[in-house]
Amino acid sequence: MDILLLAGLWLDGSAWDDVVPALRTLGHRPVPLTLPAQDGATLDDQLDAVLAAIDSSPEKPMVVGHSAASTLAWLAADRRSATVAKVAMIGGFPNSDGERYADFFDIEDGRMPFPGWEKFEGPDSADLDVEVRNGMAAKAIPVPEGVARGAVRLTDDRRFDVPVVLVCPEFSPAQAREWIDAGDVPELSKARHVDYVDIDSGHWPMVSKPAELARLLAATAGED
């Protein structure tokens, strides 16, 4: 199966470098996407790039969104409900219609720079050593304001028929179920097929647990 890989904020396709070969070995075709991040880029630009990858796939792909990109993956399911096989969300949940995509930190000169590791102390980053943190911070790509503050537009209720798999890193499947059952994630409360998968990692398992993450994604892609 084609597996489209969408990294979260400040990351590009290289975030999946250690996951890609493992997925290939497991019989899948991983497609890590580097999304538009130039000055003036918008959320629609990034969505168009994802849709183009879906449309060029020879089969129905699984779309994987990490962190904030869980919303981007869900937007893709909304626009291509008939041609997306599954959506996997790693450490993130989809926003609702009308919400801003990822308006989490200050905008400086039209971009949202990486705010520093102090914002992610605790379970998010506990499994990343200083060298890895420094390397990720050095490569961080500031997020264009038009992406971070872009409005989420969901238009097709058929998205709720697309199977969803939540990969739970710094939180547990039990916590995720509790949040969804309580209505804290309205989009997934309405989804008809939601499965939960645990991974013992922080917020960036593609960096700290790439082989294990690849196995989980491969197993998810292989399930009907």
Image: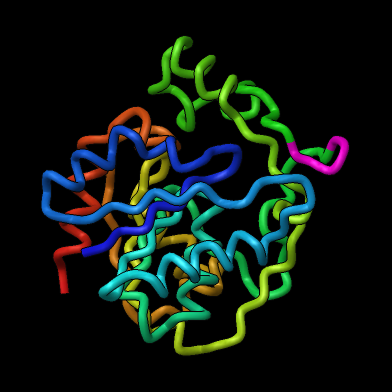
86 or 178: nearer the viewer: 86
The residue sitting at 41% across, 39% down in the picture is 170
Main secondary structure of the magenta stretch: loop
Residue 40 magenta-drawn? no
The residue sitting at 43% across, 36% down in the picture is 14
Quarter location, residue 161: bottom left
Residue that protrudes farthest toward the right in the picture? 109
Q: Is residue 116 left or right of residue 159?
A: right
Q: Please provide percent x and percent y for residue 38.
A: 70, 45
Q: Is residue 143 left or right of residue 221?
A: right
The residue sitting at 73% across, 67% down in the picture is 151
Relative to 161, say whether 115 is above or below: above
Residue 110 magenta-drawn? yes
Q: Is residue 10 left or right of residue 197?
A: right
Q: Is residue 71 left or right of residue 65?
A: right
122 or 37: nearer the viewer: 37
Bounds of the magenta segment: 108-112
Query: In which quadrant will I find the C terminus?
Result: bottom left
Relative to 88, say whether 106 is above or below: above
Relative to 141, say whether 47 is above or below: below
11 or 97: nearer the viewer: 11
The residue sitting at 12% across, 44% down in the picture is 25
Q: Please provide percent x and percent y for residue 22.
A: 19, 40
115 or 54: nearer the viewer: 54
Q: Please provide percent x and percent y for residue 93.
A: 51, 59
